[in-house]
Structures are given as structure tokens and as C-alpha cells.
Image: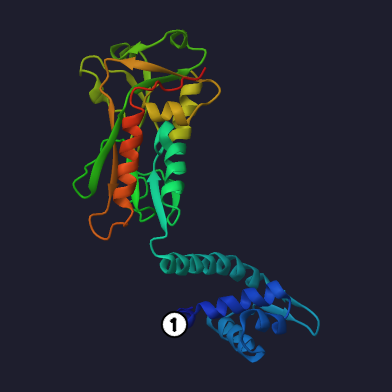
Amino acid sequence: MDARRGNSAGLELKHLRCLVAIVDTGSFTDAALELGVSQAAVSRNLLALEKILGVRLLHRTSRTVVPTTAGVQALARARPLLSGADELVTEASTGHSRLHIGHAWSAFGRHTTEFQRRWHHSHPETELRLIRHNSSTGGLTEGLCDLAVIRAPLDLKPWSHAVVGHEHRYLALASDDLWARRRSIRLDEIATRTLAIDRRTGTTTLNLWSDTAQPAVEYTHDIDDWLAAIATGRCVGVTPQATAAQYRRDGITYRPLRDADPVPVHLIWRRQDFHPATHAAVALAIDLYRENRHAPAHTHK
């Protein structure tokens, strides 16, 4: 066991590439052609890999090459490792040709499609990718994006940030709920109901109500869990306008909330080494929210 651990330090990607190429092409000769190396180099790399792992990886005959049980297991690990390495090289070589914007729930809500269209038209040199990640910073802390759309209460001190707009709050409820027949709901009425709250990425806290008149709470884990709880009729949910626009589901109705402060929408990014297109993205988001601040949100029933 200890000997294997010592040998593992010599494991290289070329060893794994040879194993995958041999299996995929069906022979050492074709693997050498695919990789652009000699057949002897393919054999050496495979032998080195088998020595490092301490197991035989292939059954070889004069006509066929078939992975052993250990070989199948090694292939299952090798493929994602090689794919990840290739992605790392691609991202490093393309530099800032992609802009990743993360979000936990709703991206830019009803502005999302227009944001994507305008970005593609104005910045064709920078590919835009929206990434949904269930964390308080929408994947920014995890290194998954360059900027993140944030609506949930968050300590913004570690980040550079800008308010790009505000969104009215809506009540999400089951479509067969009696309240679904009404045009709007008062915030204080919700104290009589059970409220679904996502503590990790949701925007709603009990601070919206006084200490003496707070709703009962059911905690959920993400947007899908939140919507499922509401669809049953046992809960209602308070959410920004973006959710009402982005998640139109059968069985869910959204109604405007009266007497509730709007939710600020922030874009946040790292203070150091930020993407060159950051300020262009912030400016576009601000423009979209400013242009459409009086337009009504869709409600679904």
C-alpha cells in the first residue's frame, strides 16, 4: 500500500491519455497515430501506469485490447480528469473571451433574455455564460463565475459591487389557494400562513414582520424545493419579481405584495483581478432595469 502511494507521485496525464487512446482506438498502433507519438512510447506509458497503480489494466491478444476490471475503473477516473485538464487549458488560453455570470435563482429575471441578446450584439468577442449555483454568492466564492447577481441579504464588504436595480416583492402560492383570486396581498396578512424560506439563497427573512406577528416557517434547500413546497398548498413564499418572471410553473400563482420594500439587485465581483468586461455588464444591467422599471411582471395561474 505504501509503495503504491509513493509511486503515485509519478502519475502524469500522458499515462492516462495513452490508456484512453488504446481503449478508444482498439490498438496500440492506432493510439500512437492519434496521439502523435511512437508505438513504443504508448507501450512505455501504459506499463508505467500499470506499475504506478500496481494492477494490470488491459487484456492484450494479437487482435484485441480489452480493459480489465481494474482498467474499467481506471478509465472511469481518467476520462473526467483529462476533460477537466483540457478545459483548464482552453480557459487559460482563451483568457477573457468568456464572461461567466453566476446566480442562485433567477439571473436578471425578466431582463435575462434581453441582456443575453444585447450582450451578443454589442460584445460578440466575449461569450456570455450564465451559471446557476446554489450558494449565497452565486458561485463567485467557489470560482465558478466572474460576476454574480445577488438578491439575498449578504455582507458585501469582501466584494466590489453595484446596485443595478430594484424588484417588487411577490407572493407565490398554490393556484387553487383562495388568495390566488385576489389582485394583490398585504404583507401583514402573511403572518397567518406558513412561509417557505430558503436560508441559503432566499431573499426573505422574518425581519419583514414584527416580532409579535410573524408567520410560521418551513425551511427549504433551493428554488425547486421551495416551489414544490408551495405547490402543495401548505406554504406560501415571498420572492422578488424575477422569480415570478423566471419560474412560471403549473400550479403556482404569483400576486403582488403591498406594503413591502423592494429587493435591491446587486452585481458583485472580486476586487482583485476582475474581468475586463465587468463594467460593461454592470452598465447593461442598469440600463435594462431603468428602461423597464414600470413594466408589470407576469403572474401565472
Residue at the spot of label 1: 6
Position of 223 with respect to 162 (left or right) is: right
Query: Could you classify mark 1 by the number of other residues whose Cα lies within 10 Å: few (under 14), some (14-19), or many (20 or more)?
Result: few
Amino acid carrying label 1: it is: Gly
Position of 97 with respect to 186 (left or right) is: right
Residue 284 locus on image (x, y percent): 34, 42
- Name which residue lies at 61% across and 79% down: 18
The image quadrant that residue 154 belongs to is: top left
The residue lying toward the viewer, choosing from 147 and 164, is: 164
Residue 157 locus on image (x, y percent): 18, 46
- Name which residue lies at 22% across and 44% down: 156
**Residue 177 shows in this picture:** yes
Position of 90 with respect to 186 (left or right) is: right
The image quadrant that residue 17 belongs to is: bottom right
Note whether 185 is above or below 298 in the view shown.
above
The residue lying toward the viewer, choosing from 228 and 155, is: 155
